[in-house]
Amino acid sequence: MIDGVRTKTLRLIPDSRGYLMEVLRDDDDLFAGFGQCYVSATYPGIVKAWHAHSRQTDTFCCVQGNVKVGLWDGREDSPTYRQSEALVLGEFNRTLLQIPPGVWHGWMCLGTELAVVLNVPDRHYVYDEPDELRRPWDDAEIGFEWHVRGG
């Protein structure tokens, strides 16, 4: 696992009406503070990548559909500098993922259904001075394999 990235398995609590799934609580180990809460929807086959933050910690899960999350450590002082990692989150793997500042990340919607990601970052978005660093989804330096090959 990339240094500083943390995960928590989420648990569904079903009953005869449906289910409840707690995502994040203020007494949770992964609670880094509250900046805002938002959802990001992604169409099938679309890649939303790459971005990183200088100060912000993202804590998110996929609440509908499934996504392949890509991580790449761009922090020169990190023991996992320039390492990449892939995780599948969503209905097949209900997991909360926390990404520290300096770790580049993004995702691709898997399957034929819309994917919806819920994010609870520790800082709110500042429209005039966004804490957003961007790279193209197919950045050669990162060299991440988004699309699945094989049969």
Image (cartoon, helix red, strand yellow):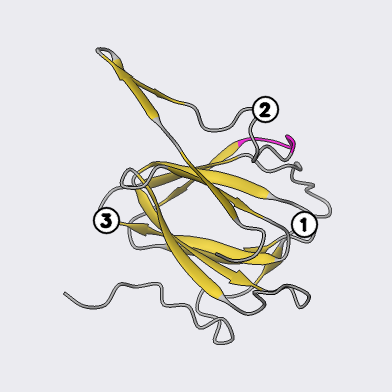
Left or right: 5 in relation to 117:
right
At mark 2, the secondary structure is: loop
Residue 107: where, in percent of width, then height?
47, 60
Residue to which mark 2 is pinned: 27
Q: Quadrant of residue 17?
A: top left
Amino acid type, mark 3 = Gly
At label 2, counting other C-alpha atoms closer than 10 Å, the crowd grade (few under 14, some 14-19, many 20 or more) is: few
- Three-letter amino acid code at the position of disc 2: Asp
Badge nearest the viewer, 2 or 1: 2
State which region is magenta: 33-37
Q: Which residue is label 3 attached to? A: 111
Q: Is residue 55 highlighted in magenta?
A: no
Residue 52 position (above or below residue 20):
below
Q: Residue furthest left?
A: 151
Residue depicted at 64% across the width and 41% down the height: 30
Residue 37 placement, left or right of 44: right
x, y percent for residue 48? 50, 62
The first of marks 2 and 3 along the sequence is 2
For disc 1, the marked residue is: 131
Q: Residue 143: give its label.
A: none
Secondary element type, mark 1: loop
Q: Secondary structure at mark 3?
A: loop
Q: Residue at x 79, y 47 (%)?
A: 126
Looking at the picture, how far across and down is residue 131, in whole percent?
77, 57
For the residue pair 79 and 141, the one nearer the viewer reads as: 79
